[in-house]
Image (cartoon, rainbow, N blue to C red):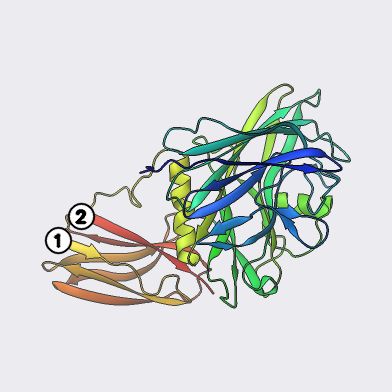
Amino acid sequence: MHGRFLVPLLLAVPLPALGQWTSALHDTGVVQLEVFDNGKLGAFSDGAGGTIGEGFVFAAENGLFEGAFVVGQDYDQVSGDVYGYPDLEWITVEPITAITPPAGFDEAYEAVYTDSGAPNPIGLDVTQTTYGAAGDPFLFVEFSIANTSGGDLEDLYVGVFTDWNIGNSNENDWWYGSFSQILYAFDLTRKNPNHYGVAALDPPDNDYPVSGFSGCADGAGEASLYAGLTVIQLCGPGGPKDVRAILGVGPINIAVGEAVSVSFAFVGGTDQGDVLENAQRAQCVFVSECPPTSSEPTAPASSLALHAPTPNPARGATTFSFSLDRPMPVHLSILDTLGREVAVLVDGATAAGEHRVRWEATGLPAGVYLVRLSADGAALSRRVALSR
């Protein structure tokens, strides 16, 4: 799956006030992400209206003004600054270095920093590892967070802040896809039609679920960052606006001298349906297991077929088509992300041939749903994104 080796690009740039920071540019051929050894991800403000770094690029279009890694313990104790250059809170211990990538990946970088530059440090030593593979529309960012505070730490919240500038940055909006745990943004004017987001990745034991997400365009102080890390949908979608988003996981407890690992993926897509599908793919790649969309047996290709919904994403309604090679009982239904059946479109004897069924998603919230075709002792399924 991951064939082409990507040549690492390593940059070192001196800063007058801070000595040096280093960065590396990931490039899968589909997405690019510049990563730094000071807690910044993609790019960051230079304090004069411009940016340092290449940002997060999908399909040759950058969508990111600033990204940052943040950890919060309380409203007045958040390590990780936003728009803080040159007074950075994460202090470099080991600069960006190319390392041997994990199996199945083509490139990886590592850096180490502490929160000793924060006004009210928590006492953290962070090893940041980033990696990607040729052809993938996502890149992984993993943080190993060690407790150097001298005591046990409880109820930490860990997350990624992103200031998205997609196309016309004042005409952006955002949404959270719960199935893939991705907080993504897009340009309502479609000047840049791509969708960009950050997904929280589940480890196999699912220790640290999403705790908060926000797409507010308010301040970037510690109280706002902590609220975004901990409060689900601090402010709702409903642009146009300048989207400054934060996605958090927790609570996390770290015993003194111990460390935990938390991971995210930067994901791009051509539209809403594509970015949600790519985020789901990132999830299964991360746990090294990409199961079928349904645990039910796959139907023989000759007996039935379920085709892609049109349109997808759907704005309130979409059409499904399926075909049967002979008459048979059919059950065509819609499932939500919890596997609950929310609509039945066909239930009974159905003639052979092509069939088209329109789904009017009245009263259902936006999100990702599964259409499932059950017939002849087997089942097929496809995902459809519903927007409002």
Per the rendering, the mark at residue 299 is 2
Which quadrant of the view contains residue 122?
top right
**Quarter the C terminus occupies:** bottom right
Location of residue 78 in the rendering, given as x and y in whole percent from the top left corner:
80, 44
Look at the numbered disc 1 and give the secondary structure of its residue: loop
Q: Is residue 79 at least partly visible in the picture?
A: no
One can see residue 284 in this view = yes
Decide if residue 131 is on the left or right side of residue 164. left
> 361 and 176: which one is in front?
176
Residue in front for this viewpoint, 381 or 243: 243
Q: Residue at x 66, y 65 (%)?
A: 165
Q: Which residue is mark 1?
A: 303
Q: Where is residue 98? Give x, y as percent.
A: 57, 33
What residue type is disc 2 on? Ala
Point 47% across, 48% down: residue: 282
317 with respect to 161 (left or right): left
Q: Are marks 2 and 1 in contact (CB under 8 Å)?
A: yes
